[in-house]
Amino acid sequence: MILSECQGVLILFYLQQLVVAVEAVAAAAAAAAVVVVVVVVVVVPIAVAVVVVVVVVVVVVVAVVEMLVLVETAVAHEVVVVVVELVAELVVVVVVVVVVVVVVVVVVVVVVVKKY
């Protein structure tokens, strides 16, 4: 299938939107990791750390839903989206989220062990 110039521009637009969404998720997850570590290290109740983790999860879910909507819109316009960069960005997001979860679990365990 030969793409018209208009379709090419449309593909670039959707790719840019997807990359921006993925980068926003990565930035939010990294910022949340810092907040969680600060919250737990300052020994504020663990409930606050749990609330922060819930907020992180909500932010990530919202961003993923936005990306899925963009992909769905792109497909609806019969645009074939194949992006190695997008996959790489998604891998980064997944790694950041996993690191956030591991850091939170380790810090919470350390705080609980110190208290008891």
Image (cartoon, rainbow, N blue to C red):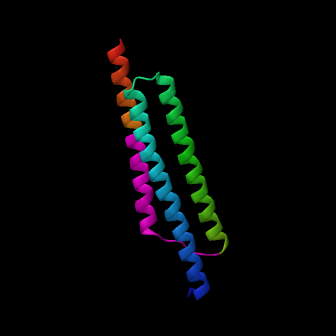
Splitting the image into 4 quarters, where does residue 105 fall? Answer: top left
State the residue lying farthest toward the top.
Answer: 116
Q: Position of residue 114 (x, y in %)?
A: 32, 16
Q: Residue furthest right?
A: 76
Q: Is residue 106 above or below residue 68?
A: above
Q: Residue at x 36, y 14 (%)?
A: 115
State the residue in front, 87 or 63.
Answer: 63
Residue 6 location, x and y as percent?
A: 61, 85
Residue 103 occupies quadrant: top left
Q: Is residue 39 above or below residue 28?
A: above
Residue 88 appears at what percent x and percent y? 40, 61
Bounds of the magenta segment:
78-100
Q: Which quadrant holds residue 77?
A: bottom right
List the single residue furthest toward the front.
Answer: 42
On-image quarter of the C terminus: top left
Q: Position of residue 106 (x, y in %)?
A: 35, 30
Q: Magenta residues: mostly which secondary structure?
A: helix
In the rendered view, tell whether residue 78 sits above or below residue 52.
below
In reply to whether residue 86 is colored magenta, the answer given is yes
Residue at 44% of width from left, 52% of height from top?
Answer: 93
For the image shown, how many numbered marks are present on the structure? 0
Picture residue at 43% right of the left edge, 59% below the top: 89
**Residue under the point 59% across and 77% down:** 10
Horizontal side, residue 44 vs residue 113: left or right: right
Query: Which quadrant is the N terminus positioned in?
Result: bottom right
Q: Is 15 covered by the magenta stretch?
A: no
